[in-house]
Image (tube, helix red, strand yellow):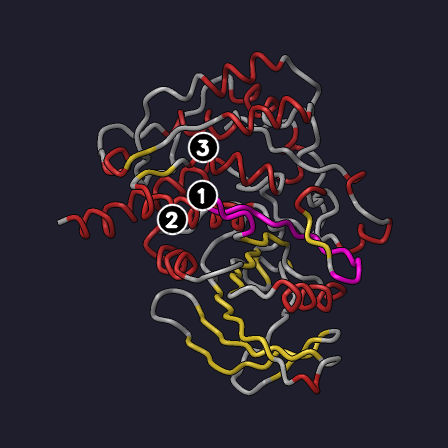
């Protein structure tokens, strides 16, 4: 496999050996015409991916990766707003061809759209970022009511859903109070957690919720109590949490939030099987209102999961989905979402399995 210059940049010590796409630094500017042609040239006829994640890389992969990260915000935005490739259910179900190389080229034709550190609202915000190079895009950044900073972005959903998700990093010890304050203020129906607390002996997320029924945890002004626990035959743990605000005890107001924890998704890559993730995605799609989604960095697994939920909703509503346009929209809202071409391929694999086992069965 060829590697991009960005993937060879120095990484924070707490990251695993395989580089994160969010570690990319902008490459030297290349001609925008080449990038546009690389992206638009992929928009001819194509079909859904099979389950295979093995691809053959062309010699031009280095250039494609460089083009995906070149800075020029106006041209980036124009490209991100224009790329589209609708896929009908029949396209996803068609077994002919598995264009992994084409999906690779398509993925790397989309600019990462990373935010720069100059977009941080305050000097102290740097200490609240799990990874120094991952900064929330200013236009969609979630602001706490007291003006405090948290590394999180509002992300659009399918159709006209302007604020379907909040994509955020796994909380740090020093951001636990901020995280729960955000939950209290934004009032999501669920929190979807896609990382383990420790992976390969490296911390990925601070424990921020009670593990046993009846236990309570207080962070800042919010207390979380675990009311129900379902270890789940569907591959994820479901918890029902009741939140109380310490400054509003007389009001008697509480907030009920589901916590859905999927622990079988290795960092930087894809789950072993689409079958294991679909029940969580379907549960999330069925929930109303806002969903908070996080992994460790809040980009790779978070982005791929949001994309899967969006495309499932599109399939249910219209019988077609647009993975390419969804990827672009995610990156407009939070730069770097969906970190690897493997995750982009897995998105197609999971959608094909959804169409085969859910939609095709329902049509019979």
Q: Which mark is residue 324?
A: 3
Along the line of sight, which residue is nearer the eye, 172 or 337?
337
- In this picture, which residue range is highlighted in magenta? 145-163
Q: Is mark 3 on a helix, strand or loop?
A: helix
Percent of width and height locating residue 113: 63, 33
> Badge 3, how many Cα within 10 Å: few under 14, some, many 20+?
many
Left or right: 315 in relation to 323:
left
Which residue is labeled 2 in the image? Answer: 313
Q: Distance between the residues labelled 3 and 1?
A: 15 Å
Percent of width and height locating residue 249: 70, 85
Q: Is mark 2 on a helix, strand or loop?
A: helix
- The extreme right residue here reads 123
Q: Which residue is drawn at 42% across and 66% down?
A: 236
Q: Are marks 1 and 2 in contact (CB under 8 Å)?
A: yes
Q: Which of marks 3 and 1 is nearer the N terminus?
A: 1
Left or right: 315 in relation to 178:
left
Along the line of sight, which residue is nearer the eye, 292 or 343?
292
> Badge 2, how many Cα within 10 Å: few under 14, some, many 20+?
many
Which residue is labeled 1 in the image? Answer: 159
The reply to whether the magenta stretch includes residue 157 is yes
Percent of width and height locating residue 69: 63, 28
Q: Which residue is drawn at 70% across and 62% down?
A: 172
Tag count in the figure? Answer: 3
Q: Distance between the residues labelled 1 and 2?
A: 9 Å
Of labels 3 and 1, the one closer to you:
1
């Amino acid at each position: 496999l060829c590697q991009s210059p960005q993937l060879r940049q120095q990484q924070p010590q707490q990251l695993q050996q395989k580089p994160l796409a969010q570690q990319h630094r902008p490459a030297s500017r290349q001609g925008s015409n080449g990038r546009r042609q690389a992206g638009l040239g992929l928009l001819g006829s194509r079909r859904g991916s099979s389950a295979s994640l093995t691809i053959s890389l062309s010699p031009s992969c280095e250039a494609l990766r460089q083009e995906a990260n070149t800075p020029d915000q106006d041209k980036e935005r124009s490209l991100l707003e224009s790329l589209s490739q609708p896929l009908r259910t029949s396209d996803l179900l068609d077994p002919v061809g598995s264009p992994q190389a084409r999906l690779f080229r398509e993925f790397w034709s989309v600019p990462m759209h990373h935010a720069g550190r100059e977009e941080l609202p305050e000097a102290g915000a740097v200490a609240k970022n799990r990874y120094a190079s991952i900064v929330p895009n200013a236009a969609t950044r979630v602001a706490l009511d007291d003006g405090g900073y948290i590394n999180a972005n509002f992300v659009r959903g399918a159709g006209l859903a302007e604020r379907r998700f909040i994509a955020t990093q796994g909380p740090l010890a020093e951001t636990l109070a901020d995280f729960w304050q955000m939950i209290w203020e934004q009032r999501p129906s669920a929190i979807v957690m896609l990382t383990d607390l420790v992976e390969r002996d490296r911390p990925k997320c601070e424990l921020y919720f009670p593990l046993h029924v009846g236990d309570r945890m207080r962070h800042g002004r919010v207390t979380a109590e675990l009311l129900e626990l379902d270890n789940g035959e569907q591959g994820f743990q479901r918890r029902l949490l009741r939140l109380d605000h310490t400054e509003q005890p007389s009001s008697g107001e509480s907030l009920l939030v589901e916590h859905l924890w999927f622990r079988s998704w290795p960092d930087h890559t894809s789950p072993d099987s689409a079958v294991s993730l679909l029940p969580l995605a379907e549960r999330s799609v069925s929930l109303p209102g806002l969903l908070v989604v996080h992994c460790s960095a809040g980009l790779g697994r978070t982005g791929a999961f949001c994309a899967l939920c969006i495309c499932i909703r599109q399939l249910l509503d219209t019988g077609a989905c647009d993975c390419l346009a969804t990827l672009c929209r995610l990156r407009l809202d939070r730069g770097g979402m969906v970190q690897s071409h493997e995750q982009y391929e897995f998105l197609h694999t999971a959608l094909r399995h959804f169409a085969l086992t859910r939609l095709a069965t329902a049509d019979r």
